Amino acid sequence: MDDITSQLLESIETKRMLLSENLEIIRDIGNTLIGALRQHNYIYLIGNGGSAADAQHIAGELMGRFQKNRQPLPAVALTTDSSVMTAIANDFGYDMCFVRQIEALVRTGDVILAFSTSGNSQGIIHAVQSAKTIGAITIGFTGKDGGQLQNAVDICLKIPSNNTPRIQECHITVGHILCSLIEKGLFGV
């Protein structure tokens, strides 16, 4: 029971710190996403492993529905096409998996949401750099120190933890908050 209690308390404390340190950044990310969607731009989401699952989860909430029935929003997780991912990895190396997709799909004004708990995934860093040269807005979701990603993106949300599970829990919590802000901002309450 002590281990269960300890993990739950750590999760609660991480979210308390997130609340005290990141409200303005979360608001800024929400406003950026709403603005891009109002201009008919796309949101592309990237990540590896658990972060890929988070990217897919949030894309699903935006394209499908979150809390209200409304028109679908253009949100695409670039983690889902195994044929594309494996072909690019085979021919160009894994670090190019998102870069090649971004070069093919992303346009000026689109938004890249890049998830990396460490902030040091080279494939994510390269993808963000590629997106910036196209004129996309780049947003990073990282852990406490931000890694290299914090300096590569336009906006960086750094979760106040070095514990991967706590970081991922907060990434998905913030993702849900952003979905709520987007629905309210674009479609009303």
Image (cartoon, rainbow, N blue to C red):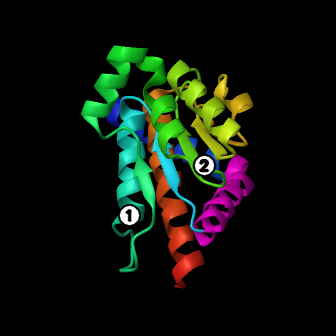
Compared across the picture, whether 67 is left or right of 22 comes to: left
Does any portion of residue 128 appear in the rendered image? Answer: yes
Between 102 and 173, the one lying in front of the other is 102
Q: Is residue 183 above or below residue 111?
A: below
Residue 154 image position (x, y, % from top left): 73, 42
Q: Amino acid at mark 2?
A: Arg
Name of the residue lying farthest toward the bottom: 189
- Res 149 → quadrant: top right
Between 172 and 127, the one lying in front of the other is 127
Q: Is residue 4 above or below residue 174?
A: above
Question: What label does residue 109 carry, if any?
Answer: none
Q: Which residue is mark 1?
A: 63
Magenta extent: 20-39
Q: Amino acid at mark 1?
A: Met
Does any portion of residue 93 appear in the rendered image? Answer: no
Considering only order in the chain, which callout, 2 or 1, is on the residue closer to the N terminus?
2
**Quadrant where the N terminus lies?**
top left
Residue 42 is a magenta residue: no
Q: Is residue 27 above or below residue 46?
A: below
Mark 1 Cα within 10 Å, few/some/many (few <14, many 20+)? some
User: What is the secondary structure assignment of the residue under circle 2?
Assistant: helix
Mark 2 Cα within 10 Å, few/some/many (few <14, many 20+)? few
Residue 105 image position (x, y, % from top left): 49, 46
Residue 169 image position (x, y, % from top left): 44, 43
Residue 30 is a magenta residue: yes
Compared across the picture, whether 73 is left or right of 34 comes to: left
Q: Nearer the viewer, mark 1 or mark 2?
A: 1
How far apart are the alpha carbons under marks 1 and 2? 30 Å
User: What is the secondary structure assignment of the residue under circle 1?
Assistant: helix
Q: Is residue 141 above or below residue 31?
A: above
Q: Which residue is mark 2?
A: 16
